[in-house]
Amino acid sequence: MSKSRKYLLIAMILSLCLSGSHISIADASSSKSVTTENVNVENNDAEVNKAEENASSDIQESSFVIKNFKPREYDHILIDYKSSLTMSALNENNRIPMGRMVTMMTSLLMLESHNSDDVITARDAFKAPAGNSIGVNSLEEFKLIDLIYAINFTSSNDAIKVLVESDGGSDISFTEKMNTRAKELGMTNTNFVSPYLNTAPNQYTSLKDISILFRELIKYKDYYDVMSSKSHVIPVTNKKTSPRERMLNPNLLLQVDAGKYKEGEDEYSFYDKDVKGIKVSTLKEGTSICASFKIVNDKELIAINYSPSGSIQCYADNKHLLYNGEANLHIVNVVDKGEVVDTIKVTEGEEEKVVNVISSKRITLVLKADETVQTAVNKTVQIMNRDAESIKKRSKVGIMRLSKNGQEIAVVDLYPQLSIMENTFIGEAEIEENRELTTWEKFVWWFWLLFKIGLILFIWFRLLERNRKELRKQFRARENKRQSVVDFGMHKDLMRK
């Protein structure tokens, strides 16, 4: 057994040595999460597909273009999903009535704690609250995803109640969960008093808070599928022998036959094939909130706006906002992490060396279409430390100030890239940015991991087999020795006879 332990120790050391060249993987999202650039949403709704195919030629099928675009003011927030940068905003922190947006938080809480195909059962003697309804029956069983569709498409209060009570909860306890989660997400201008659609004055939110909630929701492929769908039908259940009536996504930007609106003197269709709708809330007071998500070229735009003039104006403003982000604004890297921004001369003894100075972080900025980094951004580098010993210790050597239109927008710390004594990279290694691995790198990483596991198991089983052979050999030797021993007492008795 001592030999086996020795070989096992050798195997472990070998494994540790091999692991020295591993590829580190940045934190990955959960299996439920999804990056929108990798999502291929399939619409299995044959009727909607047919309607799109037969759509008249005057409906915008290519990239949406607004002729004679003119800026105008309305409460809004426009965000680039990839970078999380706010591209444009006005009154985004003002408190506004929540309306149907309440169902977004319910959706998030359920998706965080359940799988989309989990079966949710209505309570015995189920009593539906007032308001929109899908006609829930006592002890009726639904898949969670069907209820998510119902609350987002029709704001059905009875569907909300089934979800609220699914884990033995109550309206009060569920509302507490909603407010707790809102605080965790940093939604500072949001308050829930009920999980249902209502007009209570102390149930409010803001455009910025809606954008925070939406960015969290879109991580879940199930919700992405919901907001991208044009319609949904809840199938047969244990209490209903026929499917329910088709529910339409209330966002007109998704509906081929949604009609037209005017932008100045020109007329445009509400429908936009690149838009993935999320939520629309029309309140009794005539005010509306519109939220849409559009993937076009290399941009993933979240556009949320609030209109006191009704839903038609809200949709028009939403398309205006999306086009502004698509055509008139762009996101640029002002400076990259690890980018060489200057050089300094350092004297070591009698020798003078040139050391590159690099940026410690990436700075991105929203510019207008006719602006460039060179023309719009001023970079000022200040080197404050040229000491050789400090450079060898990887100390900060200076800062770079970035300004636009005379206003400072960022200050970036600068570090030496090369050690003047050892001539080795130090800055990039110290501030290397975590990134998502490519598919090939992930394949190599998993292959290398499985190879190491297989090698350890192979060595382990070989050691066990060798140990078993050794034990069998010792056992046979003992048996042979025992069988060859002469019983001299019995031999004497036989001789006497």
Image (cartoon, rainbow, N blue to C red):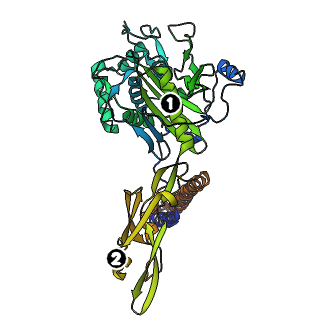
**Residue 174 position by quadrant:** top left
Which residue appears at 56% of the width and 12% of the height? 236
As drawn, 350 above or below 25: below
- In the visual, does 30 lie left or right of 126? right
Please report whichever mark, 2 or 1, sits nearer to the chain's N-terminal start.
1
Q: Nearer the viewer, residue 410 or 68?
A: 68
| Residue at far bottom of view | 350
Q: Secondary structure at mark 1?
A: helix
Q: Secondary structure at mark 2?
A: loop
- Residue 222: tell me if it is visible: no
Separation of residues labelled 2 and 1 (CA atoms):
50 Å
**Residue 44 position by quadrant:** top right
The three-letter code of the residue at mark 1 reads Asn
Position in image of residue 350 (x %, y %): 41, 93
Position in image of residue 169 (x %, y %): 32, 20
The three-letter code of the residue at mark 2 reads Asn
Q: Residues within 10 Å of mark 2 (few under 14, many from 20)?
A: some
The residue wearing badge 1 is: 318
As drawn, 207 above or below 4: above
Which residue appears at 54% of the width and 43% of the height? 328
The residue wearing badge 2 is: 385
Which residue appears at 59% of the width and 55% of the height? 447
- Residue 70: tell me if it is visible: yes
- In the visual, does 300 lie left or right of 132? right
